[in-house]
Amino acid sequence: MSYSGSPYGASTLLVIISSIEHGGLAIAAFSAARFAECAQAIADQAADLAARGWIPATSGNFSLRMDEVHVAVTASGCNKANLTPQEILVVDLQGKPISSGGKPSAETELHTQIYRRFPEIGAVLHTHSLNQTLASRVFAADQRLDIAGYELLKAFSGYATHDDRIVIPVFANSQDMGELAAAIDAYLAREPITHAYLIDGHGAYAWGASMADARRHLDALEFLLSCELELRKLRA
């Protein structure tokens, strides 16, 4: 059941009574206007990424932080090339669905893991471009890719010179998202991850403080992976 409306306007507040647990109602409130804004931004981003061929079939998933405790994320199984705002759901920071109308992406746990770990992060993009997928296979044995010497490193927040170095971890793929999230947590307990990682045979995750930042990081990663793959061929 849901109720919309508030003393401040019909679209200001949306309250969802999502489930009954231990004899009580689980209630979540969030801004309907903010949800609509996030849903449209995700749909727009999906259309552009699909046009680039980075999310073939029903692959990929995207999310935006709505507030301190809610995330807007793509629904499972939808074709992102034709994604509509109606195919965006709301989950809490544990990945539990708040809104009705679909099932969150199976990889929602990897999105919410990033939001929990990094409170400053506002957007997460997961794509399956050819370069990302190939690089994830090529560098899987090393479990990481060190990228240095490129002017485009300055596209990543916090990087100021081509002399900087970014480490892109490569995690073993798993259909068990809990297992994969645990592997990422174990890595983060040893060292930080800056802006992106790869999953072997799967694709890339990139994030940023805003959708624009996340997309810039993803674009920079895509170009640098292309450079590294081409260099590997030239040096062979």
Image (cartoon, rainbow, N blue to C red):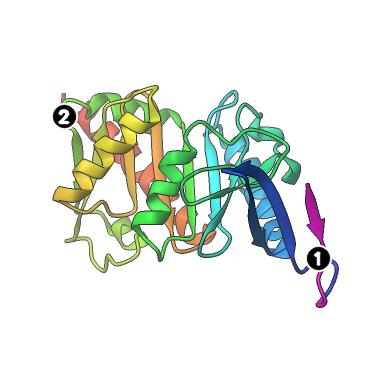
Q: Position of residue 120 (x, y in %)?
A: 41, 66
Tell me the residue that label 1 is attached to: 11
Which quarter of the figure is the C terminus placed in?
top left
Task: Give the main secondary structure of the magenta stretch.
Answer: loop
Of 100 and 149, nearer the camera is 100
- Above or below: residue 103 compared with residue 208: above
Tell me the residue that label 2 is attached to: 235
Residue at x 16% of width, y 25% of height: 141
Q: Position of residue 67 (x, y in %)?
A: 56, 64
Of 130 and 99, nearer the camera is 99
Q: Where, by quadrant of the figure, is residue 225 drawn?
A: top left
Q: Is residue 115 visible?
A: yes
- How many numbered callouts? 2
What residue span does the magenta drawing correspond to?
A: 1-8
Residue at x 18% of width, y 49% of height: 189
- Above or below: residue 11 compared with residue 114: below
- Above or below: residue 78 compared with residue 46: above
Badge nearest the viewer, 2 or 1: 1
Left/right of residue 49 with respect to residue 229 in the rendered view: right
